[in-house]
Image: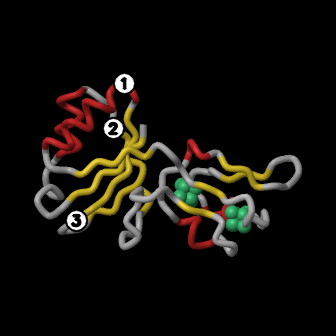
Amino acid sequence: MLLLLKFDSKTIRKPIISKATLETNALINILRANVGARKGEMVVEVDDSKARDVEEVFRRFGVEVVELREGIVKDEGRCVHCGLCTSICPVEVFEFDENWRVVVREERCVHCGVCIGVCPCNALSLPVNSINKDLKFHTI
Ligand code: SF4
Ligand code: SF4
């Protein structure tokens, strides 16, 4: 399961990822992060069997947690299959099929939001609340 973690000025400097790992024995894979002095956001991947326990630890320490159940959405009515998104996505969500049409492997999406800005047809969107557009995510 993918979780979006939102840290504020009180939680940003605490070793909460380490605490969650130690308390739950879960492996927490950080996929995306933007951590500043006063706030930050991370997208992490946790095994489904441990996700509830990990969420509970984050929430207990004051971190806002959003489950990312859906990945990028492509509006088929707008997409012209230009392929720009295939070159920019860091985790290869977009692929050409045998008919040179761009298909989406939504389950790979880590919600970085990069593809949305490059699509010339405004065909791409992320679920509401999945990302803070004021923060730019960086590859770790
Ligand atoms: S960049 Fe936009 S129009 Fe081009 S293939 Fe991707 S979704 Fe379709
Ligand atoms: S939001 Fe990021 S990870 Fe998801 S499809 Fe777009 S570029 Fe790829």
- Residue 26 drawn at (x, y percent): 30, 29
Bin the neighbour count of mark 1 within 10 Å (Cα to Cα): few under 14, some 14-19, many 20 and up: few
Whole-Å distance between the Cαs marked 2 and 1? 12 Å
Q: What residue is rendered at 68% in x and 75% in y?
A: 120
Q: Quadrant of ligand 2?
A: bottom right
- Front label number (2 vs 3): 3
> Pointers 2 and 3 in contact (CB under 8 A)?
no
Horizontal side of residue 101 vs 42, given as left or right: right
Helix, strand or loop status at disc 3: loop
Asked whether 16 or 125 is in front, the reply is 125
- Residue 86 drawn at (x, y percent): 69, 59
Q: Is residue 62 above or below residue 60?
A: below
- Residue 46 drawn at (x, y percent): 37, 35
Lower sequence index among marks 3 and 1: 3
Horizontal side of residue 72 vs 39, given as left or right: right
Q: What residue is rendered at 17% in x and 38% in y?
A: 19
Residue 49, labelled with which disc?
A: 1
What quarter of the picture does the C terminus occupy?
bottom left
Whole-Å distance between the Cαs marked 3 and 1? 29 Å
Asked whether 122 or 48 is in front, the reply is 122
Residue that label 2 marks:
28
